Amino acid sequence: MTFEVRLCMAVNPPALRMTVAEGNEVEAAIRNLDILVTSSIPTTTQRLKNTVRRPVYWVEVFDPVGDKWVPIEPPKEASTYPYVLANTVYGTTFDVTRRYSRDYTYTTLKQRLESVSIQTERGACTWWTRLLSRWGGDQDDPSETKEMQQRALETAMPRRIADFAQNPHYVLERHLRQNQIIRPRRPIVGQIRGESVFLRENVCTLHTQMAWNRRGYRVIENQTPAKVVNKSELYGQWQTERIVAPPVVDGVVPRNEYGRVDLFTPSMLPAGSAHVCDAHAKRICRELGIDAVDAVVGFAFRRGVATPTIDGIVIPESAVDLLRDALQNDRQAREEREQASMEVRVVHNWRRLANALRVRAEVDAQFAKRKSSGITFKNQVSDSESEADAEAEPGTDTQGGFIL
């Protein structure tokens, strides 16, 4: 009988926040870890000795009957490490910290760098998720994913008020933002120092009417604001409905009061229309007589002034094929014009070069003689000629004057 085995490793990288002196001592400690077990450890290094701990290793064996991974004698100190990785024989690496952490939510999570997000083709993700994806760590293992989710749900309720601020499951009303409320206010899952504890899944985020419009929703008429903050009326999603733009009628695209189409989300596109993003599309539509309207996809705020962001145009869907063919012909015509213009520039540059070479040759022929060492003009006296004059016969008159 064979078993699937993978190697687990608990690592503890240096802390992010430290002084220069602490950093220097940690660097020295990393180079020589033996100083951490000696009796003459500096005070700063003594505080940071857990930061530069050596990695610890053990193995896990997959139980096909229980459909789970079983650790084989994991070290006790593994529960205090912020990162625990499981490496398979297939070259994949998984983050299994939740399985071994003693207090993941309130202690371990604070030691991990989870707040830095990076934009990728799949959307926003943390740097840690992106790093693990290089070794297949972002692949889902159904059995392990279910176990990690169950461990997250079994997280105990915090015993300190400060721990509720970032808790993923429980929340206190004092930690809500100005644009958040709890709805519904049931169930109350506990009490701490006289304050009610609610489930974080019941926290609702509120927005103004304009903010909901930018998300593709409009506030239903005769709705009472769920909250008023600094004279701003805030509404919840249960008080809104999706914006449905009027359809295209007789080839005319509906417009707002500014002569544009609000297209903050794809759902706001009018029925029977199409969104075209091309810098030359509007000019072509004007030439073909196609109704084209600028698409406003958002707002840019500069010095407190909101400026609409226009991206492409909205045209009747029936004119898409005609516009596509016209754009292709226009693109070919522009490429031909650019090619002809480039040829004209090339001929002009070659003509300038030929004229420059001709003028140079004429100047050289009249005023200079070329040598390997450079150019010597005919009216200049060379060094050899000067030496010849110096070696002239004694009876020869070398002074100036006219010879008759």
Image (cartoon, helix red, strand yellow):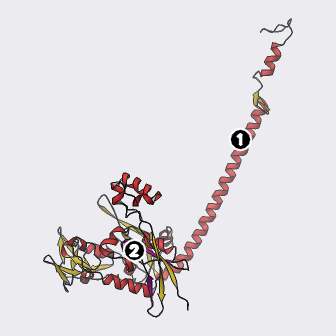
Give the side of residue 102 with respect to residue 85, left or right: left
Q: Is residue 338 left or right of residue 141?
A: right
Q: Which residues are magenta?
A: 68-95
Dot 1 falls on a residue whose secondary structure is helix
For label 2, the SS is helix
Question: What residue is rendered at 52% in x and 79% in y?
Answer: 88
Q: Quadrant of residue 181?
A: bottom left
Q: Residue furthest top?
A: 395
Is residue 120 in view from this perspective? no
Tell me the residue that label 2 is attached to: 78
Name the residue carrying label 1.
356
Tell me which residue sits at (64%, 61%) in the image: 339
Of the 4 image quadrants, the one containing the N terminus is: bottom right
Give yes or no for contact between labels 2 and 1 (Cβ–Cβ under 8 Å). Answer: no
Q: Nearer the viewer, residue 98 or 342?
A: 98
Q: Residue flagged by tag 2: what amino acid is it?
A: Ala
In space, the residues marked 2 and 1 are separated at their CA atoms by 79 Å
Q: Residue at x 63, y 57 (%)?
A: 341
23 up-or-down from 133: above or below: above
Residue 64 spot, x, y in % from top left: 48, 92
